[in-house]
Image (tube, helix red, strand yellow):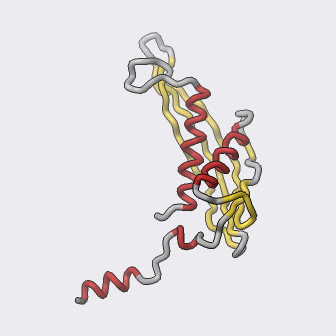
Amino acid sequence: MALSFVVFAAGCGYKTRSDLLGHIKSVTVSPIVNDTVEYGLEDDLADAIRLEFANRQWREGTDSIFTGNIKMYEVLVISLDQNNQPEQYRLVTQMSFVFEDLKRNKILRNESNYEKIHDFYVVSDRGEPPETLREAKDKLIKELSEDLVSSIVEEW
């Protein structure tokens, strides 16, 4: 009996992230600032984030606003073959973003170092199919937008 009271009392007052966002039905994704030399990255990422919000039934509108800044984008060689030719690369991007509830005038998320990594091979016979840099960049953007939007709108 005492244990069930503790479990019940511990659960009181708990709200999921979804409950906290229940009044928000729309989002504006403002143009993303790109502080890197990778041209077009900001447009591709903004489009992917808009699509992810739409996939979660949030329409374009003024209930909330997402603003972001791409701070870093790097392509790194992480392994070489026996002839010192690259066989595996790592894409790294780091960004900051703010997600604001405009209905309640409240900042809900303020991240300064949100990072995403995508490793890929450019050669066959490594257990994964090879990817071009463009394919890897597209996957990185897709994974980043999915993870970022999920971290905002889904339950923890």
Instruction: Pick the residue in front: 147 or 90.
Output: 147
Left or right for 50, reference 119:
right
Instruction: Write the residue at 34% across / 84% down.
Output: 8
User: Against 25, is 129 above or below?
Assistant: above
Residue at the top extreme, as displayed: 83
- Residue 29 percent across, percent down from the top left: 72, 54
User: Against 3, is 149 above or below?
Assistant: above
Quarter of the view holding residue 132: top right
Instruction: Pick the residue in front: 25 or 141.
Output: 25
Residue at the left extreme, as displayed: 1
- Residue 142 percent across, percent down from the top left: 58, 41
User: Against 33, is 66 above or below?
Assistant: below
| On-image quarter of the N terminus | bottom left
Quarter of the view holding residue 27: bottom right
Instruction: Pick the residue in front: 145 or 83.
Output: 145
Instruction: Write the residue at 64% across / 45% down.
Output: 48
User: Against 63, is 94 above or below?
Assistant: above
Quarter of the view holding residue 134: top right
Left or right for 131, reference 81:
right
- Number of numbered callouts drawn: 0
Left or right for 128, reference 22:
left
- Residue 78 percent across, percent down from the top left: 48, 27
- Residue 36 percent across, percent down from the top left: 71, 38
Instruction: Write the residue at 76% across / 49% down.
Output: 31
Instruction: Write the residue at 58% across / 56% down.
Output: 56
